[in-house]
Image (cartoon, rainbow, N blue to C red):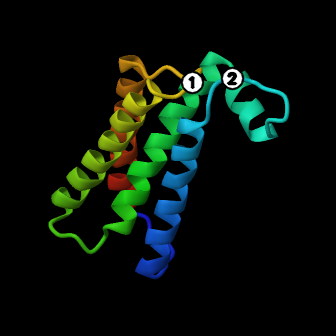
Amino acid sequence: MIHVVAIPVAYRWLITFAFIALIIVFSITPGRDQAGDSVFVWLVVNATAPIQKLMHFVCYAAVAVLWAWTLEAVEPRLLRLLLALALTVGLGATLEWYQTQVPGRFGTLADAILNAVGAVVGVIIAILVL
């Protein structure tokens, strides 16, 4: 196990929720490029499919690690890891469903599965690092 820098629990929650908020904003941003849109919207609209898939995987792996880190006080460890996995997979599935309601976005089962695979990898990383 690697020793992770001790950060107060309140800051862990803040970091975790801030990262999740960023994912939510990216996920619910309309997928249509319109005059006057921000650079942020332009990035969402113009990201290539491989980059989008990579971001699904990486972001959901990171969320799982963050949840495992934030919930460090939850014992036993297996329960903490299962909670991290459930919260992350739930977030990914919910956002994929919600994207079906956002103009220019398409929630897909393939992306939900990719989010879940990222979450599993994140939990494995948490096992090794935390």
Residue 100: image location, x then y, percent: 44, 24
- Real-space CA distance between mark 2 and mark 1, rounded to the nearest whole angstrom: 7 Å
* Residue 44, quarter of the rendered image: top right
Disc 2 marks a residue whose amino acid type is Arg
How busy is the neighbourhood of tag 2: few (under 14 within 10 Å), some, or many (20 plus)? some
Residue 42 coordinates in the image, percent (x, y): 77, 31
The quarter of the picture where the N terminus appears is: bottom left
Q: Which mark is residue 32?
A: 2
Q: What element does badge 2 sit on?
A: loop
Q: Residues within 10 Å of mark 1 (few under 14, many from 20)?
A: few
Residue 65 vs 122, above or below: the answer is: below
- In the picture of the structure, the residue carrying the numbered disc 1 is 103
Q: Residue at x 41, y 30 (%)?
A: 96
Position of 86 with respect to 32 (left or right) is left
User: Quick one: 26 or 80, which is closer to the camera?
Assistant: 26
* Marks 2 and 1, the one that precedes in the sequence: 2
Furthest toward the right, the residue is: 36
